[in-house]
Every structure is written in structure tokens, then in C-alpha cells.
Image: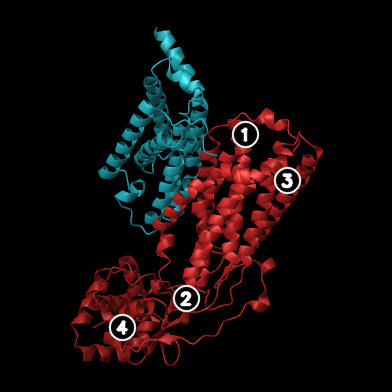
């Protein structure tokens, strides 16, 4: 039974392109590390690059949740557990990789931002569709560029705050919780005729 | 084309983009002072916001046939697949271009009501439009080539990373560098734009580079269909090499760019005959120390804010021989420190939007003015001597700006306190005798009474 469950999980992950997603998250972490010299300044661009790369990793996680099977799959095995396992695995891998990439430059903020943006992307995937899950977190990251530019970050732009700000961490975790809950139980929104 | 327009997802993104524009600093910059080139550069800078969405939407549109398993059906039609696919991209980019043009029209219409000097200059806005088209073409090419569900997020996030990364490169090397080609790097020296005839060197160079990148992107799209027809292979053979050559030429010209007081000079595009000072009659206040600005800066509250701040600072030393009889705005790069006969206090041109100056900016400006009164001509106020800083701290404290903007050690603070304790007549008398020596840097804090 245990063997069947692990094989089922592996097949589920493969059907969601989880290995490719993991590869892309690794590439995002590597890029974040490579861009380190350009992210240590105090300008808007320098400070915005790490959150934007966290959006990239978050969007990859949410996009990977798309089901290629639709109704026939939902009629078989209870999917929430498989979805939860998938999202947990990718989130943990992403947190570890982005945290490593930001070692020495507030790695906890990178992990917090990944959590918050991933929650946002998963909520977008649940409401709109998984391949368009990047829209809301990316728009929010661009909005955060304004407060960063004028050196006035607040809780409205929590990704720009340091990891020592507990309220920002709380907001990110709350968004992550809502996103995981939504995508685990409802899955991504699938349409017979997707937009575009 | 009509069918493509109906199926395109881009119009659903446009309301989000409009909301995003409304809550970013771009909207805040719509309050006077209104400088035409400043506003045009703002429109160009909106590519940072619209470009990633254009790339993501284009990548999504490019993958439509694959998502809907239309490959075999479309392969059986007689239409040239490259032209058919280009039609889809044209519709997709058309929506984004229409949005950008509407934004540009709105921005410049508002500016027309607010501006007090000059006229529209469309070079930066035009360069922004070409950059937006390149973002879309690159996203479309990525969506065709990467046959994966991750193409759209990768295109969108990747575009923003490239824009931010290139801009960061420009900030780390202001003389030249690949960063100058970023759509968010202003093509003009915004502090000098109203004083000199605008030169579109950098905007032209950006457009040349973007044309090269556009040809490369269209070549990659053609390459995707290379097996279909000889005419498409010929298109690949023309577009890819041409794009690479033009882009390489633009990067080569970028290496020749240098910065002067007016902005970035690209020798190949510089029209030396048009590079001239534009005459103007300054607008002045009727305050104890008259404050004069270029008429372009007269639209909002800038003149009032400057006059109030400067007069509060100079009030105790007004009338002392050698102290300024007027403060006047000069272009960035003009000599610093009190200069001329009669003496004039120069003001750097900084655009103040709205009716108040933020606390950090106010403190920086007040400190710069106070230091400029005591440093010599052509001396950067940041290089003021301890004695000069002591008197600047005194002026700032009496004007209730604190001394935060001026580096002060205990000796400087003590000298400032001693000077503040003197009677006004004693202060005037000491300054009359020692101002020249103070500006020359011969005095130490211990020499201040």
C-alpha cells in the first residue's frame, strides 16, 4: 500500500511537471546568487530584484499545480493530499534554495517573500487560472517598487521590510495559509476555454 | 485579425495595469511642477510596469495553438504559418501599444494644462513605445520556443529582471555602460533639460538597439517555422543576422557615450549645432532675499517652498557684506557656492511635486543652502571645513531644521552654540571681518567666537 502511495505521489508530481518546476526554482536561486553584487545597493532596482525573483519562484510553484487531466482525475483518488504534498515539497525546496542564495543578506526575508508571493500566486491560480498565477504577485511586487524608491516601506509593502518585522512575517504567512488552503481543496481553476 | 482580437487575453490585463499606474509614483508625479521632458521620461519609465505584462501576455498568446491542440488542424491550412502567427502577435502587441499611447496622451494632455514653459518632446515616449514592442516580441518568441506551461511567468518575471538588472548597471556606472540602454534610464539630464536645447542622442540609440532586438525576436519566431517554407527560411536568414548586427552596433555606440552637464552624449547622434543655451527670464519672489527660478518651475508650489526655506536660513546673515543679494536656480553642473558681483546664491534645479517638501528632502536642501553660504565658489558644500559647518549648523538650528544634514563633531557643535550665543550685532561684525577667510578655509572651529 505504501509503495502504491509513493508511486502515485511520484506520478502526480510528474504530471504536474514538478521536476521541471524544481529545476526552474533552482535556476532562480542561482540567478539570485549571481545577481548578488547588483542587489546590495540601496536603489529601487537593487532592492526590488530579490522580491521579483521570489515572485518568479512563487509563480513556478503555482503554475505547476495545473492538472492536465481535469474531471477524470478528480473522480479517482482524493487529490487534496497529493496537492498538499506537492506544494509543501516545492515550497520547502524553494525556501531552502532562495535562503541559501541570500546567505549574508537577510535570507529570512527572501524565505518570507517566497511564502507570501507563493500564497498570492496560489490564490490567483484558484480564482483565475494557474498559468496566469504570476499576474497578481508581479503587479504587487511592482507596486512595492514605489515605497522602496522613496525609502518609506510600510506594511502595505511588506516584502520591502526586513525579516525582523514580525507583522510583515505574519502577513506573508497568512497569505500563504490562505493560498495553500485554497489550492489544496479547490485546486486550480480550469476552464474548457481558457482565456486567450 | 478581428478573430484574433476577440480571442486575445491582453484586454483583461489592462484594467489591472491602469490601477497599478494609479498607485505608483508615476501618478504622484502628475502634480505640478510640470516639465515636458520630465513627463515624457515618466511615460518611457512606465515600460518597467507595462513591459513585463506585455511579455507575459504575448508568451501566453503564443502558446495558444499548442494548448488547444490545434497544430495538426492548422498545418493542413494553406496560410503561411509565420504570417498567421505574426497576425496573432500584432493583435496582442496592438492592445499593449494602444494602452501605452492612451497613457502617453493622458500624461501629456495633463502636462499641457500644467506646464508653464516649453513644449512636448516625444523622443523618450517614442523610445518607450519601441521598448514595449520589443518586450512583447521577446515574450512571444519565448512562448513559441519554450513549449511549457511555465513560459508566461518566465517571460513576465524575466523581462522585469532584465529591466531592473540593466538599470542597476546604469546606476553603478554613470559614465557609460550597457545600463544606459535601459528603458527606465532617462535619456536627458533632467536637471538641465529646461536650460539647454534637448538632445535626443540616447533616445535614438535606445531605439536603434530595440530595433535590433526586435529583428532578433521576429527572426526567432520565423526560425520556429523554418521547416515549413523556403520563404520563412529566407526571412530567418535576413532577420537574425540583421538584428544581431544592429544590436552589436548599438552596443558599440553605447560604449562611446559620455555624460556631460546636459545628459548623455552619444557622439554619432549628437547635433553640435543644436546644442545651445535657451534664453529665459527668471521668475523671482518679493522676499527679503529674492529667490529666482526658471519659468518652467513656476507652475506649482516650488517657488514658494524654496523662498520660504532659503529666507528662514539666511535671515540672520542678510545684509552682511559678501552675503548673497539673490538666490537663483542654475542648471546642474553650474559652479557651486556664493558667486558673482553682486553675490548670488545658486540653487540646484530639483522638481518639487505637490505643496510640501518631504522631511528628508527638506533637511538635505536646507543643509545644502546653509553650507553654500560659507563655502567658496566652485567648492562642493559636502567638502565644507569644520568652521564652515559650524556656522551652517547655527543657521540650520535657528531656522528650526536641526543640524542633521551637516556632519558635526563636538568642536563644530560647540562653535555653533558659541556663535548662537552672540548678539546679532556681534555676529554681523565678526562675519563682516572674517567671511573671506572663512570661505577660503583658513579658520578652525576654535576661531569662531
Mark-to-mark CA distance, 4 and 1: 68 Å
Name the residue beneath numbered marker 1.
B65
Identify residue for label 3.
B240
Q: Which chain carries label 4?
A: B
Q: What residue is drawn where x is 29% and y is 41%?
A: A171
Q: Quadrant of residue B260?
A: bottom right
Q: 10 Å neighbourhood of mark 4: few (<14), some, or many (≥20)? A: some
**Are the two marked residues, 4 and 3, in contact with CB atoms closer than 8 angstroms?**
no
- The subunit carrying tag 3 is B
Image colouring:
by chain
Marks 2 and 3, the one that precedes in the sequence: 2
Mark 4 vs mark 1: same chain?
A: yes
Q: In which quarter of the image is residue B29?
A: bottom left
Find disc 4 in the rendering and name its residue. B311
Which disc number belongs to residue B115?
A: 2
Q: Where is residue B156 in the image (x, y as percent from the top left)?
A: 52, 44
Amino acid at each position: 500500500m505504501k509503495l502504491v502511495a509513493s508511486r502515485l505521489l511520484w506520478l502526480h508530481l510528474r504530471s504536474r511537471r514538478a521536476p521541471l518546476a524544481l529545476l526552474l526554482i533552482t535556476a532562480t536561486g542561482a540567478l539570485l546568487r549571481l545577481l548578488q553584487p547588483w542587489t546590495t545597493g540601496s536603489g529601487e532596482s537593487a532592492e526590488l530584484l530579490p522580491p521579483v525573483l521570489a515572485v518568479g519562484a512563487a509563480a513556478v510553484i503555482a503554475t505547476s499545480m495545473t492538472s492536465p487531466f481535469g474531471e477524470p482525475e478528480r473522480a479517482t483518488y482524493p487529490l487534496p493530499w497529493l496537492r498538499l504534498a506537492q506544494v509543501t515539497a516545492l515550497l520547502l525546496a524553494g525556501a531552502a534554495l532562495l535562503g541559501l542564495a541570500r546567505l549574508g543578506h537577510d535570507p529570512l526575508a527572501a524565505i518570507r517573500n517566497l511564502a507570501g508571493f507563493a500564497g498570492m500566486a496560489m490564490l490567483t491560480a484558484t480564482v483565475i487560472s494557474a498559468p496566469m498565477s504570476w499576474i497578481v504577485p508581479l503587479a504587487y511586487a511592482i507596486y512595492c517598487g514605489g515605497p522602496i524608491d522613496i525609502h518609506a516601506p510600510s506594511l502595505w509593502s511588506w516584502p520591502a521590510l526586513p525579516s525582523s518585522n514580525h507583522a510583515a512575517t505574519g502577513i506573508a504567512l497568512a497569505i500563504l495559509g490562505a493560498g495553500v488552503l485554497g489550492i489544496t481543496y479547490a485546486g486550480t481553476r480550469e476552464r474548457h476555454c481558457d482565456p486567450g | 485579425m478581428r478573430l484574433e482580437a476577440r480571442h486575445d487575453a491582453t484586454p483583461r490585463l489592462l484594467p489591472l495595469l491602469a490601477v497599478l499606474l494609479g498607485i505608483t509614483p508615476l501618478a504622484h508625479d502628475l502634480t505640478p511642477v510640470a516639465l515636458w521632458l520630465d513627463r515624457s521620461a515618466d511615460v518611457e519609465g512606465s515600460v518597467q510596469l507595462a513591459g513585463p505584462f506585455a511579455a507575459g501576455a504575448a508568451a501566453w498568446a503564443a502558446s495558444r495553438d499548442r494548448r488547444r491542440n490545434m497544430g495538426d488542424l492548422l498545418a493542413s491550412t494553406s496560410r503561411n504559418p509565420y504570417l498567421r502567427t505574426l497576425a496573432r502577435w500584432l493583435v496582442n502587441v496592438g492592445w499593449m501599444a494602444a494602452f501605452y499611447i492612451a497613457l502617453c496622451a493622458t500624461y501629456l494632455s495633463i502636462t499641457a494644462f500644467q506646464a508653464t514653459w516649453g513644449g512636448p518632446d516625444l523622443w523618450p515616449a517614442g523610445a518607450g513605445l519601441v521598448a514595449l514592442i520589443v518586450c512583447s516580441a521577446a515574450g512571444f518568441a519565448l512562448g513559441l520556443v519554450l513549449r511549457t506551461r511555465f513560459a508566461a511567468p518566465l517571460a513576465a518575471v524575466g523581462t522585469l529582471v532584465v529591466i531592473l538588472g540593466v538599470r542597476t548597471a546604469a546606476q553603478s556606472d554613470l559614465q557609460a555602460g550597457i545600463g544606459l540602454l535601459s528603458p527606465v534610464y532617462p535619456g536627458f539630464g533632467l536637471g538641465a533639460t529646461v536650460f539647454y536645447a534637448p538632445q535626443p542622442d540616447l533616445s535614438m540609440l535606445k531605439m536603434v538597439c530595440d530595433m535590433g532586438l526586435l529583428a532578433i525576436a521576429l527572426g526567432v519566431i520565423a526560425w520556429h517555422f523554418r521547416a515549413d517554407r523556403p520563404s520563412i527560411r529566407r526571412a530567418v536568414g535576413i532577420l537574425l543576422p540583421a538584428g544581431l548586427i544592429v544590436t552589436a552596433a548599438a552596443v558599440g555606440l553605447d560604449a562611446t557615450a559620455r555624460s556631460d552637464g546636459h545628459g548623455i552624449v552619444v557622439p554619432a547622434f549628437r547635433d553640435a549645432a543644436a546644442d545651445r543655451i535657451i534664453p529665459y527670464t527668471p521668475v523671482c519672489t518679493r522676499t527679503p532675499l529674492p529667490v529666482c527660478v526658471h519659468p518652467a518651475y513656476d507652475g506649482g508650489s516650488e517657488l514658494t517652498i524654496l523662498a520660504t526655506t532659503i529666507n528662514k536660513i539666511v535671515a540672520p546673515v542678510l545684509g552682511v557684506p559678501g552675503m548673497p543679494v539673490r538666490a537663483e536656480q542654475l542648471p546642474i553642473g553650474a559652479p557651486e557656492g556664493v558667486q558673482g558681483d553682486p553675490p548670488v546664491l545658486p540653487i540646484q534645479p530639483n522638481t518639487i511635486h505637490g505643496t510640501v517638501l518631504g522631511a528628508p528632502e527638506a533637511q538635505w536642501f536646507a543643509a545644502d543652502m546653509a553650507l553654500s553660504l560659507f563655502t567658496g565658489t566652485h567648492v562642493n558644500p559636502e567638502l565644507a571645513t569644520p568652521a564652515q559647518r559650524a556656522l551652517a549648523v547655527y543657521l540650520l538650528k535657528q531656522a528650526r531644521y536641526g543640524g542633521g544634514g551637516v556632519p558635526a563633531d563636538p568642536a563644530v557643535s560647540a562653535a555653533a552654540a558659541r556663535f548662537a550665543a552672540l548678539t546679532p550685532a556681534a555676529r554681523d561684525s565678526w562675519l563682516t571681518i572674517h567671511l573671506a577667510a572663512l570661505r577660503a578655509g583658513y579658520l578652525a572651529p576654535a576661531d569662531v567666537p
